[in-house]
Image (cartoon, rainbow, N blue to C red):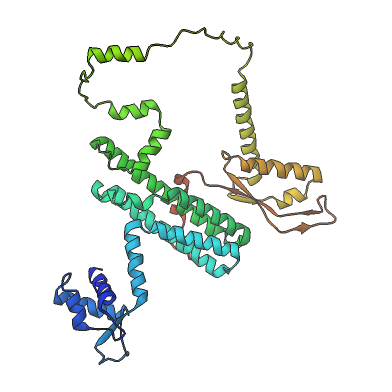
């Protein structure tokens, strides 16, 4: 990379339309590589078309720099600074825009979904190996590579929802993508857990970025924050104020005049606590919704509710659909409802027309993802 950057700089500073000779390029790279190293890399650059002959003839000794190679150097520099996760985020964003604009066919969409899934699996495996086997000094340089975990999960879930609506046959590819995104999220959590444990042992507050400490200050309890300094020894304070200064401050900041306190509020009426009653009612409703969804899905990961709706009366079908939609809107109920844009018409049935409705189980923890991924055969993705 140093030789490639030196060649790029030489063309940017010295080149003209006639290009540069091999000896001129070797002289420009003398500060970063000797003649033998330059000889080896020069042949590689010509074979990769990073360098091209001016007239495409074997005897021509002048070369020009391919602009595409210059862009590749910029991309490589960005990847070295931000990590490959940023490129996965970029591919997710482009795919969302293309699906929304309707410019992707099914074949290209499958290729992109599998590319994102495979890149996530490679990134997750690489991160787990480093977290579990490499020294802490090597992990510190990886902190800024995984800051976009939450945004990646949101973008992945949004893309899968768009694919599920527009390309129902690709639902399995979307499920695999969500599983790999959950594995990556768990790996990032394990990565920061190790950094935090090491920071606590060494009492080195530079091991985590400032944003992590800001989040802890806003979300942690006072006892947890105070525990950081439980074993820190402080010097006793020194008296820096004279008696005259104390008297002067007492005159300026005298206590306010006493005032009458308001009468205490009346005692609440005897009976059950309304807050606890509301909480119990909400918990019971949540259990009812969860049991109803489990009954509808029948222990599977997804179920088609269209036939069940069409077999009821209008009032019963509307009531069932409303209850299912309310249950899916509850964040604590791990189910998702998809209402298709299509229309099924049955003039002779109890419900003459309805849209197809599907119910899906949403994975809740990474342990389930790991169990599913371990039971899949090696060539399950290709099949």
Q: Is residue 380 visible?
A: no
The residue at the point 53 percent across, 52 percent down is: 157
The residue at the point 57 percent across, 61 percent down is: 170
Which quadrant of the view contains residue 332? top right
| Nearest to the observer: residue 154 or residue 61 | 61
In this rendering, the answer to whether 333 lies above or below 61 is above
Q: Is residue 166 visible?
A: yes
On screen, residue 21 versus residue 75, left or right, reads: left
In this rendering, the answer to whether 224 lies above or below 159 is above
> Residue 303: horizontal and vertical position, in percent?
64, 50
| Nearest to the observer: residue 24 or residue 197 | 24
| Nearest to the observer: residue 180 or residue 271 | 271
On screen, residue 43 versus residue 159, left or right, reads: left
> Residue 178: horizontal and vertical position, in percent?
50, 53
The residue at the point 55 percent across, 69 percent down is: 107
Number of numbered discs on residues: 0
> Residue 291: horizontal and vertical position, in percent?
63, 37
- Can you say which quadrant of the picture contains the N terminus? bottom left
The residue at the point 35 percent across, 15 percent down is: 252
> Residue 117: horizontal and vertical position, in percent?
46, 59
């Amino acid at each position: 990379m140093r030789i490639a950057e030196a060649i790029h700089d030489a063309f940017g500073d010295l080149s003209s339309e006639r290009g540069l000779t091999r000896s001129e390029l070797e002289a420009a790279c003398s500060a970063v590589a000797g003649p033998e190293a330059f000889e080896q890399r020069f042949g590689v650059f010509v074979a990769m078309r990073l360098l091209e002959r001016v007239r495409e003839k074997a005897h021509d000794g002048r070369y020009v720099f391919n602009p595409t190679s210059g862009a590749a150097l910029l991309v490589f520099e960005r990847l070295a600074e931000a990590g490959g996760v940023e490129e996965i985020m970029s591919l997710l964003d482009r795919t969302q825009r293309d699906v929304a604009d309707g410019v992707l066919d099914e074949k290209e969409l499958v290729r992109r979904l599998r590319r994102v899934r495979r890149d996530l699996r490679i990134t997750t495996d690489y991160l787990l190996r480093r977290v579990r086997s490499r020294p802490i000094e090597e992990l510190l340089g990886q902190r800024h590579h995984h800051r976009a975990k939450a945004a990646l999960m949101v973008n992945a879930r949004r893309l899968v929802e768009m694919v599920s609506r527009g390309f129902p046959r690709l639902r399995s590819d979307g499920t695999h993508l969500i599983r790999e995104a959950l594995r990556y999220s768990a790996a990032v959590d394990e990565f920061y857990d190790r950094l935090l444990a090491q920071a606590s042992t060494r009492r080195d507050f530079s091991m985590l970025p400032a944003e992590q400490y800001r989040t802890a200050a806003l979300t942690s309890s006072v006892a947890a924050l105070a525990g950081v300094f439980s074993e820190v020894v402080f010097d006793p304070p020194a008296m820096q104020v004279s008696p005259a200064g104390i008297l002067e401050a007492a005159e300026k900041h005298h206590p306010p005049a006493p005032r009458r306190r308001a009468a205490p509020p009346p005692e609440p009426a005897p009976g059950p606590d309304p807050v606890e009653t509301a909480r119990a009612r909400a918990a019971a409703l949540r259990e009812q919704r969860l049991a109803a969804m489990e009954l509808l899905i029948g222990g599977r990961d997804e179920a088609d509710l269209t036939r069940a709706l069409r077999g009821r009366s209008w009032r019963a079908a509307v009531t069932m659909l409303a209850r299912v939609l309310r249950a899916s809107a509850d964040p604590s109920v791990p189910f998702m409802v998809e209402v298709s844009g299509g229309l099924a018409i049955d003039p002779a049935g109890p419900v003459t027309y309805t849209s197809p409705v599907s119910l899906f189980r949403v994975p809740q923890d990474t342990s389930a993802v790991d169990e599913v991924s371990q039971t899949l055969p090696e060539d399950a993705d290709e099949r």
